[in-house]
């Protein structure tokens, strides 16, 4: 869980008592970052032989387009 909440107190047999995804059924507003790892690699698409891993994001250039 998050914000210091204890999972054993917040999760029961019926699901989460706090922070359940059903609370967001009307939508989620957030912001994120889109990293074009494939463009950085010079590849047209992801393959099973060369998947994108979390450590691959750190090697992508840090610039805004």
Image (cartoon, rainbow, N blue to C red):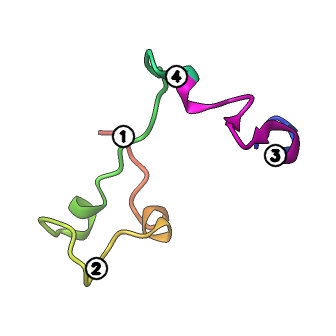
Q: How many numbered discs?
A: 4
Q: CA distance from mark 4 to mark 2?
A: 34 Å
Q: Using the image as rendered, state which of residue 64 and residue 11 is in the foreground.
A: 11
The answer to whether the residues at label 4 and label 1 have Cβ atoms under 8 Å apart is no
**Image height check: is 25 above or below 13?**
above
Q: What segment carries the magenta color? A: 7-22
Note whether residue 2 is visible. no
In terms of sequence position, does the residue under pointer 1 or pointer 3 come before the other? 3
Residue under numbered circle 2:
50
Residue under numbered circle 3:
7
Secondary element at image label 3 = helix
Q: CA distance from mark 4 to mark 3?
A: 19 Å
Secondary element at image label 1 = loop
The numbered dot on residue 25 is none
- Whole-percent x and y of residue 58? 49, 63
Name the front one of labels 4 and 1: 4
Secondary element at image label 2 = loop
- Whole-percent x and y of residue 18? 74, 28
In the rendered structure, does residue 12 fall within the stretch colored magenta?
Answer: yes
Residue under numbered circle 4:
24
């Amino acid at each position: 869980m998050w914000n210091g909440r204890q999972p054993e107190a917040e999760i029961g047999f019926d699901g989460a008592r706090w922070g359940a995804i059903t609370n967001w059924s009307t939508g989620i507003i957030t912001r994120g970052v889109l990293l074009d790892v494939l463009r950085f690699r010079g590849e047209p698409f992801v393959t099973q032989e060369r998947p994108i891993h979390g450590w691959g994001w750190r090697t992508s250039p840090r610039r805004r387009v």
